[in-house]
Image: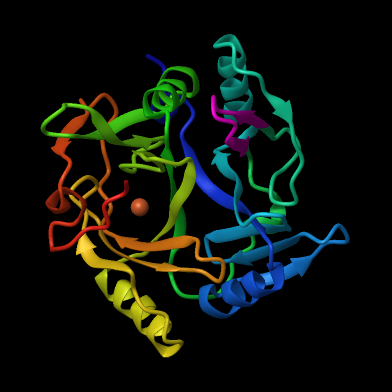
Amino acid sequence: MTTLQTTTPARLLYLHIGSKEPQRQIDFYERLMDLSCTRYPDGSAVLLGPQRAVRLSPADRSGLLAAAFSLGNTEQLNRLRERLEHQGCATLDTQSPLLADGAFSIRDPQGRETLFGVPSELIEISREGMPGRLQHVVFQTTQLEAVIDFYVNTVGFSVSDNVVDPESGQLMVCFLRSDDEHHSLAFFRGSQDEWDHHCYETQEWNDIRDWGDRFAKEHITLFFGPGRHGPGNNLFFMVVDADRNRLEFSAELQTIPAGQEPGHWPQCEHTLNSWGRAWMRS
Ligand SMILES: [Fe+2]
C-alpha cells in the first residue's frame, strides 16, 4: 500500500479558523502564541510565528474551516494529487497566502476541508518566539469508520494506534500519521461532529513548563493535564483560546517507522492520561 509516509510525507502547516469575534482571537494569538498579524482587504487575517501559522476569517460560527498540510516539493504535491484522483477523490485548485501555486483541497465524507500545498515564501521566513511547531489536529465524529476509511484508504494516512471499548470492542479513537510522527490527525468517536483540538509540539518538558507559566500570568487555567498520553507517549497539557477552541502543548511525541502494525489500547482514563484523570469525550 502506498502511504503518505512512504511516498509523499505531509506535515500540518497551518489552520484556517473561523471566528465570530476575529479581533478577540487575533489578540489572543498575538499575545499568547507569539504570532504577528497581517490583515487582508476581505476581512481575513494571517497570523505567523515560529513554525506555526493561523489563517483567520470572520464567520457566523467559531471553529475550524480547514487544515492545511505541506508537502516537501511540487513533485510530491502533484504525485499526491494524481493518487487522490486515481482513488476517485475530487481535488479542487485553491489559493492561500500561505501556499505556493499548485495547492489543492479535498473534502472528506463529512465535508471537512483539507488543503495540500507547498509553503509560500511568506511562511518560510524564520520568526522569533517560544518553541511550538503546529503538529496535529483532532476531530470528534459521529461516523468514525467512514472517516477513517477515507483518510487511510483514499488519502494514504497510516494508523499508528487504535483505542477500543474493552467491552464492546468498538473503535473509539484512531491516531493517523502522515510522516514519521505518531499522529498529525486523529478522530474520536463522539455524539457530535466537532473540532476537538490542535497541538503544538515543543522541544522538551521545560518548554511545557514555560508555556504553562505564560498562560498562568493571564490566569488562563489548564483544563486537561499536565500528563502523558498512552498513544504517542507525549507529555501534554491543554488550554482554550478566546473562542474556547482547545489548544494542546506537547513534547516527546513518538515516531513510528513505516509498516509498523497499529497498536491497540483499551478506552480508559489511563490510556488517555497515564498520570491521572482524563478528559473523556462522549
Ligand atoms: Fe492531541
Q: Is residue 261 left or right of residue 146?
A: left
Residue at the image point whose x is 72% and y is 55% from the top: 59
| Position of residue 35 measured from the top left corner of the image (x, y, whole percent) | 60, 71
Residue at the image point whose x is 49% and y is 45% from the top: 194
Depicted 244 relative to depicted 229: above or below: below
Specify start and end residues of the magenta stretch as a single range: 105-116
**Image-quadrant location for residue 170:** top left
**Image-quadrant location for residue 6:** top left
Depicted 56 relative to depicted 186: above or below: below
The way the protein has been coloured in the rendering is: rainbow
Quadrant housing the N terminus:
top left
| Position of residue 57 measured from the top left corner of the image (x, y, whole percent) | 72, 57
Residue at the image point whose x is 67% and y is 23% from the top: 91
**Image-quadrant location for residue 38:** bottom right
Q: Is residue 210 left or right of residue 116?
A: left
Nearer-the-camera pick, 204 or 126: 204
Q: Is residue 275 left or right of residue 39?
A: left
Nearer-the-camera pick, 166 or 14: 166
Q: Residue furthest bottom?
A: 217
| Position of residue 202 measured from the top left corner of the image (x, y, whole percent) | 37, 64
Residue at the image point whose x is 27% and y is 57% from the top: 279
Depicted 131 relative to depicted 136: above or below: below
Depicted 57 relative to depicted 50: above or below: above
Image label count: 0
| Position of residue 199 measured from the top left corner of the image (x, y, whole percent) | 42, 57
Q: Is residue 113 magenta?
A: yes
Q: Is residue 83 magenta?
A: no
